Amino acid sequence: MAGPKKLFIKTYGCQMNVYDSERMSEALSTRGYEQTDAMDQADMILLNTCHIREKAAEKVYSELGRLRPLKDGNPDLKIGVAGCVAQAEGEEIVRRQPLVDFVVGPQSYDRLPAMLDQLDRGEIALETEFPVADKFDKLPARSRPSRGPSAFLTVQEGCDKFCAFCVVPYTRGAEFSRPTERVLGEARELVDRGVREITLLGQNVNAYRGHPGGLSGLIWELSEIDGLDRIRFTTSHPNDMDDALIDAHGTCEKLMPYLHLPVQSGSDQILKAMNRKHTAQGYIALIRRIRAARPDILLSGDFIVGFPGETDEDFEATMSLVRTVRYGQAYSFKYSARPGTPAAEKESVPDDISSERLQRLQALLTEQQRAIQDSMVGREVKVLFEKTGRLEGQLIGKSEYLHAVHADAPADNIGQIRTVRIVESVRNSLKGELVG
Ligand code: 5AD
Ligand code: SF4
């Protein structure tokens, strides 16, 4: 009898895709597929794509082109494209690249098993509709052991904000929140399997509406689960940081002191052109309120430089906002026009100017990030150990502030939260010693 069929998934982009890939793998396991790390041995290759920046679709086409020899060597190999490029390009993918057997948009993963039947009949399978339902509801309950004590859990998808540069409202569709009961059920199951930290995911997770109390209502319910020790969420829009959520940062012990709150620009004129619906001062005032609730919170942000119309003065306003806020973590990007978005119609800033701005901004953000990381030396933090390190006897985990920390510790500390004194700040992590 033939053994299990092998599934290779390549995941691009954000954590929502990482979560989706896990769930697709689970769905396909009900049909005899087992995940492999060896692409050349796969019976099915699935590219879970991201469309947020740069020439995403072109990259997918060239990746697909490279699969040609594998398909020639194994005509039964199934090749699928999932994720946001699948949503955006739809059947165009099959037209341009006949190697592809199926295309599945992010709202249609529950259709995967049925799509396999189509493939078995020798048909091409395409699913890129936006059904109004909980796609995860129809996927099998999470059935496999997690890989570590920290897990992602998608609670919200889609976005109604329509920032002028962003494809998400088009690729992931309107905001949809999973009902609290489902989220709690999945969280309990994860905890039963050893998970101690859950990061709630959503394109706009603080717009969660599955609970009458919004995201903080959900967080408080989750905090009642015994064995679940840490709750995080990402990613958020400033306008959805309501009082109750800010308050939870000060009062909910399980909610970790880390917040990713993208601002994109520090110039009111650019924020307006971006359709962000808030001002730079409004954002700074919000940060002050959050810090008043939780003084040690570590802030993270996203920035775009070179948005159409951005002048030197606008860019300096971004630099100034960064100096005021002080970020412990940040992601910054050069604007790239995404076809179909309103900003794509506008005249772009010359590339050499954008590149220079990006360099300056990144230098400032790196300096801040370093300073905050270095300031941890001498402090005691709580580390959730996740796995063994590269060196013998070493474990790696995350502090409350999401800093990677490594320390010498027996392997049975994996899955445990231990107090660690930080002794050194190295390039991308902190070195610590177990206390007690
Ligand atoms: N160009 C550059 N950066 C973008 N982002 C989203 N769309 C674009 C674009 N067209 C960035 C934003 C967002 C992050 C996920 O990606 O900063 O917060
Ligand atoms: Fe895109 Fe985020 Fe703006 Fe929504 S809020 S349109 S996901 S950048």
Image (cartoon, rainbow, N blue to C red):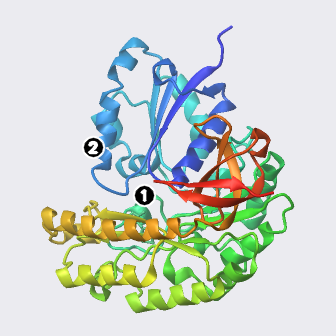
Q: Which quarter of the image is occupied by the C terminus?
A: bottom right
Q: Earlier in the sequence, mark 1 or mark 2?
A: 2
Residue 239: give x, y in percent of width and height.
51, 83
Q: Amino acid at mark 1?
A: Thr
For the residue labelled by badge 1, is the local secondary structure a helix, a strand or a loop?
Answer: helix
Whether residue 415 is situated above or below residue 231 in the rendered picture:
above
Asked if residue 137 can be seen in this view, the reply is no
Residue 334: give x, y in percent of width and height.
27, 63
Give the image quadrant in which the ligand numbered 2 is located.
bottom left
What's the residue at 29%, 63% (across, down)? 340
Q: Amino acid at mark 2?
A: Glu
Asked if residue 316 can be seen in this view, the reply is yes
For the residue labelled by badge 2, is the local secondary structure a helix, a strand or a loop?
Answer: helix
Is the CB atom of the residue marked by disc 1 within 8 angstroms of ligand 2's nearest atom? no
What's the residue at 80%, 52% (across, down)? 191
Q: Name the one closer to the observer, 195 or 414.
A: 414
Q: CA distance from mark 1 to mark 2?
A: 16 Å
Q: Name the one closer to the observer, 165 or 266.
A: 266
Q: Residues within 10 Å of mark 2 (few under 14, many from 20)?
A: few
Q: Provide the residue designation for mark 2.
A: 58
Q: Name the one closer to the observer, 293 or 176.
A: 293
Q: Provide the residue designation for mark 1.
A: 171
Q: From the image, state whether disc 1 or disc 2 is nearer to you.
A: 2
Q: Residue furthest top?
A: 1
Apparent side of residue 367 relative to residue 118 in the rendered image (left or right): left
Residue 69: give x, y in percent of width and height.
34, 18
Residue 122: give x, y in percent of width and height.
48, 23
Q: Which quarter of the image is occupied by the N terminus?
A: top right
Whether residue 123 is situated above or below residue 288 in the rendered picture:
above
